Structure formats: structure tokens, C-alpha cells
Amino acid sequence: MDMLRAARSFHSLRELSAATGLDPSVLSRYATGQMLPSHDTALAIVERLRSHLDLPGIVLGAATSPGGFIYLERALSRHDILRLVTIELYLRLRERGVKAEKVLVPEAGGVVLAAALAQLLEADVVVARKSKGDPSREYYEAHVVSPPSIHRIYYAPVDVLGSGSRVVIVDDLIQSGYTLASMLRLVEASGSRLQAVAAVVVVGDKWRRVANVGRVEAIAWLTP
């Protein structure tokens, strides 16, 4: 019961008991692994925890934002928050029937989340880097041009991303949309099929005009 163990960092057993309708002593034994719930009980616990936990508040409360910028590194470095975010995003993708062979993530703070989510999806992790790590390998590449003066190139190894794969794009933060647009170009260049986009925080809606994506699964949505 990974979700229950993580939830204990933010709520007492009495609070979790009120949310789930189960005795605190029973929840404690579930959380420690001394006793295992039935399949139906486990599903019920997960759904009640999902409706009870203020996951956006937990994530944003742990994030730092000096100067108005959002930094999610501190939040995602916590095992309990990472676990809750990963499970929530996985469940949303599963509810949509999303299946993936590759999880594509730009080189930055979202890599740890992508690796955790890929484990649950049973998919490979593809890190799109800002430089070619091995000059002997072949790479797909996508250019990011962000007005007025930012020009960046992301590279994804051909032997890792493959061709014709089902891909989920993951990032920690979506704001301008330019990095997301470059990930979409890598998917297109490889002849792969985009299955979904997942993020921790999405800011505003400028990204919708830059990246041609209709839906993003995100934990928190912020208005700039």
C-alpha cells in the first residue's frame, strides 16, 4: 500500500481512518505490511485517499518559487510526494486506457518523475538531452525557438526511442509550451504515436497555442 504509506506523511491515522472508514489500527497494519487488504478493499482505500488528499496543495506547498518562478525539485526529491504524484498520474492514464512503450522526458527536473512513472507503465525511459552524449550514436533532434532569443536543440537516441513506439511525454512543469512542442517533434520525427502528456504543474494556457496538444494530465493548474 504505497499510497497509504505516503499519505501518512501528511495525515494522521485518525484522519485517514475518517477518510477511508477503516479502523486506525487496521490502516497501520496495512501501511506497515503486517496485513494485506483484499483486492476490493485496496481499490476502495486508493479511491478514498485520492478524493481526500489535497495533492495540488501538497505539491505546491513543497515547491519553492523565488521571484515568482516555480521550482519543483524540492517537491519531487521527497519520496512521499513523488510516490503520490506518480501513482495519481498512473491511475489517470490507466483510466484512459493509455498504454506506452516509451516515456519521453526533456533533460531537466522531470526525469525522476518519468523514471518512476515508466516503472508503473512498464515502459522504457527516453531522456531528450540538450547535447549528444555519444557522437557515434544516431539521434532524432528537435529545435526549440523561444522568442526573443532562446534557441535550443533536444536530442533523443534513435536506438532508445525507436520507431513507431507508443509514447507518453512527461515533464515537471509546462508553461511556455516550447519544450513540449520540441518533444512532440521528436515523437513525430521517430514515426511514433503520442498516447498522452503528463506533468506535475501547468501554468496558464499559452502552451496551448505553442504546442498542438489538446489534453494534459496534471496535478496542479496555476493561473499566471
Image (cartoon, rainbow, N blue to C red):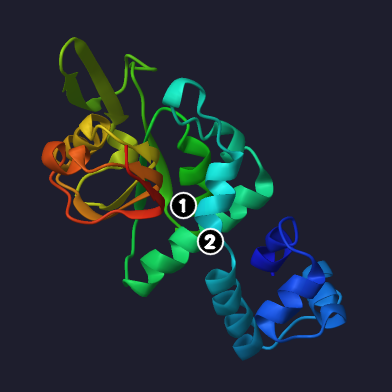
Q: Is residue 205 above or below residue 55?
A: above
Q: Nearer the viewer, residue 160 or 114?
A: 114
Q: Position of residue 46 (x, y in %)?
A: 59, 75
In front: 37, or 47? 47
Task: Residue 44: give x, y in percent of width and height.
Answer: 59, 84
Query: Element at badge 1?
Result: helix
Q: Mark 1 or mark 2: which is in front?
A: 2
Q: Do we see residue 213 in this rendering?
A: yes
Percent position of residue 75, x then y: 59, 40
Q: Which residue is mark 2?
A: 87
Task: Find numbered disc 2 in the image and state the secondary structure of the residue it sits on.
Answer: helix
Q: Earlier in the sequence, mark 1 or mark 2?
A: 2
Residue at 45% over, 37% down: 110
Q: Is residue 33 visible?
A: no
Quadrant position of residue 209:
top left
> Is residue 166 found left or right of 69 in the rendered image?
left
Q: Amino acid at mark 1?
A: Ala
Badge 2 crowding class, 10 Å Cα cut-off, few under 14, some 14 to 19, many 20 or more, is: some
The kind of residue tagged 2 is: Ile
Q: Is residue 31 left or right of residue 156?
A: right
Please tell me in which quadrant of the rendered image residue 10 appears: bottom right
Identity of the residue drawn at 34% across and 58% down: 100
The residue that appears at 80% across and 74% down in the rendered structure is 14
Q: Which mark is residue 178?
A: none
**Decide: marks 1, 2 in contact (CB < 8 A)?**
no
Q: Considering the image in quadrants, where does the N terminus appear? A: bottom right
Residue 118 badge: 1
Residue situated in front as seen by the camera: 186 or 190: 186
Q: Residue at x 69, y 68 (%)?
A: 4
